């Protein structure tokens, strides 16, 4: 569903992503770990089509991102670390606006249901977004992804700055989305959450995928941390 084939992205002579191979099936949540500058955001930006690849291919649902940008966009939802929304509109109005941009016209009841599923109660949905906490804004971002009915979700450090409770709610939501068959790629620095929520974990260093493991619940967060520290 989300696939990189020998993906390389170079800036000048510097390879930010170097021959990356990655495959994420429906129902899988792949956590990408790695130190600052390892190439995680660059990888995500290549999947989004924000950056042209230097060589190799990136595919979403079997479609080459470079060849079918519009079809790919319809299948993809993206949540950055800071979701860009309109502070003077309510959560509900933001969701309505961005859903329309994506070509959907949902009824208010349906929009409220997406927000509710993302963990934002109806009472909050009507409030001005400028007064929201970061966690609440992330929930609107997730609701936008849900309303798009995307098959693939790309997340770049979505829980940084969230309190443990909000982060835990977020993990629960990701579990539900994978259970429903979404394919998810999440860049994160949170080893504990990765262990908690990922089906697969990759560790990048200097643009290369150095370690890859399936999470069968047969290792502790401490062991993952040790592997991370020894890899980066
Ligand atoms: N526009 C750019 N021009 C030149 N080099 C860039 C550009 N964007 C990123 N890089 C370089 O690419 C490498 C990978 O950066 P990237 O942002 O993908 O890392 P990251 O793993 O997301 O790091 P972080 O954990 O800090 O978010 C870094 O060496 C960075 O300096
Ligand atoms: Mg980054």
Image: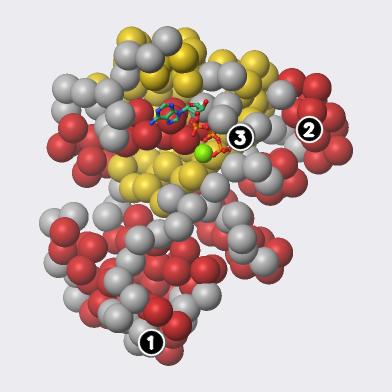
- Mark 2 vs ligand 1: CB under 8 Å? no
Task: Identify the residue position indicated by label 3 in the image.
Answer: 36
Q: Position of residue 40 (x, y in %)?
A: 51, 32
Q: Is residue 63 left or right of residue 113?
A: left
Query: Residues under labels 1 and 3: Cα distance?
Result: 36 Å
Q: Describe the element under mark 1 as helix, strand or loop.
A: loop
Residue shown at the point (16%, 59%) measured from the top left: 101
Position of 25 relative to 125 (above/below):
above
- Mark 3 vs ligand 1: CB under 8 Å? yes
**Disc 1 versus disc 3: nearer the observer:** 3
- Mark 1 vs ligand 2: CB under 8 Å? no
Q: Describe the element under mark 2 as helix, strand or loop.
A: helix
Quadrant that contains the N terminus: top left
User: Would you say residue 149 is visible in this rendering?
Assistant: yes
Q: Point out the tag, 1 or 2, that comes first from the N-terminus.
A: 1
Q: Position of residue 210 (x, y in %)?
A: 64, 16
Q: Position of residue 127 (x, y in %)?
A: 38, 87
Quadrant that contains the C terminus: top right
Query: Residues under labels 3 and 2: Cα distance?
Result: 18 Å
Q: Residues within 10 Å of mark 1 (few under 14, many from 20)?
A: some
Q: Position of residue 191 (x, y in %)?
A: 72, 42
**Disc 3 versus disc 2: nearer the observer:** 3
Task: Identify the residue position indicated by label 2 in the image.
Answer: 224
Task: Identify the residue position indicated by label 1 in the image.
Answer: 127
Query: Residues under labels 1 and 2: Cα distance?
Result: 41 Å
Discs 3, 2 touching: Cβ within 8 Å:
no
Residue shown at the point (74%, 21%) measured from the top left: 231
Q: Point out the tag, 1 or 3, that comes first from the N-terminus.
A: 3
């Amino acid at each position: 569903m989300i696939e990189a084939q020998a993906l390389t992205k170079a800036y000048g002579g510097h390879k930010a992503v170097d021959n990356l191979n990655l495959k994420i099936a429906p129902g899988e949540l792949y956590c990408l770990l790695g130190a600052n500058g390892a190439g995680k955001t660059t990888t995500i930006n290549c999947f989004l089509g924000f950056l042209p690849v230097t060589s190799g291919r990136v595919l979403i649902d079997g479609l080459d991102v470079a060849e079918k940008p519009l079809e790919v966009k319809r299948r993809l939802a993206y949540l950055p670390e800071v979701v860009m929304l309109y502070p003077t509109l309510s959560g509900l109005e933001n969701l309505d606006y961005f859903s329309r941009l994506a070509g959907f016209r949902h009824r208010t009841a349906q929009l409220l249901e997406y927000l509710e599923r993302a963990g934002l109660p109806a009472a909050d949905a009507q409030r001005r977004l400028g007064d929201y906490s970061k966690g609440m804004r992330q929930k609107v971002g997730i609701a936008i992804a849900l309303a798009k009915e995307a098959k693939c979700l790309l997340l770049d450090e979505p829980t940084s700055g969230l309190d443990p409770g909000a982060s835990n709610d977020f993990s629960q939501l990701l579990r539900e989305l994978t259970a429903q068959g979404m394919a998810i790629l999440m860049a994160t620095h949170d080893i504990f959450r990765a262990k908690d929520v990922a089906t697969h974990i990759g560790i990048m260093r200097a643009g290369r995928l150095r370690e890859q493991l399936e999470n069968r619940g047969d290792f502790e967060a401490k062991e993952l941390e040790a592997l991370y520290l020894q890899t980066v």
